Amino acid sequence: MKTKLKFMLAIAILSIFTTIIQAQPRMPKGPGLPPKIALTEEQKTQIDKINADFHAQMQALKAEQPSEDKKATLEKLRTEQKAAVEAVLTAEQKQELEKIHAERKAANEKRLEDMKALQQELRTYHEEKVLPVLKAQRAKLESKIAAEDQELIAELRTKQPQHRAKMEEGRRSFEVRKGPQRI
């Protein structure tokens, strides 16, 4: 009962942690700027034009190029767009943007460290509390299984890697038949 309660508590903590991470403020999707960067109307107009041009180029890219070339071209377009937007900003705005990026990077690194610590805690809990119980239960179960059935189970376990390989091969061939995925 205690093990079940601890496991449920660990799941609840993980869920809460995930919710907190998702609630964190993020940069707007696409090339938008954080609201802390005060833009003039002229800057807003210029950035909107840059973004509209970028969007048009993206639509054309989606329509014409095969998927392998899309990544490189997409990255090039994003780099060009970022440079064009930064060219519109003043020195103070660029400094503020760099400050925001540094704060977000630090926050992301901290979240990553926290997540790794939580994963390690869950792994340790699993190894110390869950696995011993599973092994004990398995030993009890195996003592009740007939010798013929144990041989059958052993045979099935030896075939399992082959079946997994076939399933993976089938999944890959299905992805190939579906065609290239969109970016």
Image (tube, helix red, strand yellow):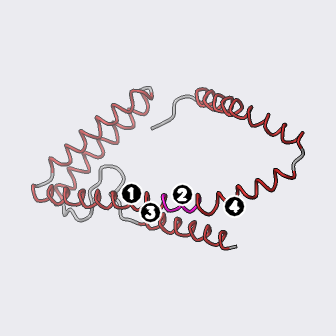
Circle 4 or circle 1, nearest the eye:
4
Residue 78 % position (x, y): 29, 40
- In the structure shown, which secondary structural element does the residue marked by tag 4 occupy? helix
Residue 3 % position (x, y): 65, 69
Whole-number angstrom distance, CA of label 1 to CA of label 2: 16 Å
- In the structure shown, which secondary structural element does the residue marked by tag 2 occupy? helix
Whole-number angstrom distance, CA of label 4 to CA of label 1: 31 Å
Upstream in sequence: badge 4 or badge 3: 3
Closer-to-camera residue (57/90): 90
Residue at 73 percent of width and 58 percent of height = 136
Query: Which mark is drawn over residue 3?
Result: none
- In the structure shown, which secondary structural element does the residue marked by tag 1 occupy? helix
Query: Which mark is drawn over residue 133?
Result: 4
Circle 1 or circle 2, nearest the eye:
2
Using the image, determine if residue 148 lies above or below residue 111.
Answer: above
Closer-to-camera residue (60/69): 69
Query: Which mark is drawn over residue 123?
Result: 2
Residue at 56 percent of width and 28 percent of height = 179
Circle 1 or circle 3, nearest the eye:
1
Left or right of 145 in this view: 70: left
Q: What residue type is labelled 3?
A: Gln
Magenta-drawn segment:
120-126
Left or right of 58 in this view: 47: left
Q: Which amino acid does label 2 sit on?
A: Arg
Using the image, determine if residue 162 lies above or below residue 132.
Answer: above
Query: Where, by quadrant of the figure, is residue 152 drawn?
Result: top right
Question: Which residue carries the number 3 mark?
Answer: 22
Whole-number angstrom distance, CA of label 4 to CA of label 2: 15 Å
Question: Which residue carries the number 1 mark?
Answer: 112
Residue at 25 percent of width and 61 percent of height = 103
- CB contact under 8 Å: marks 4 and 3: no
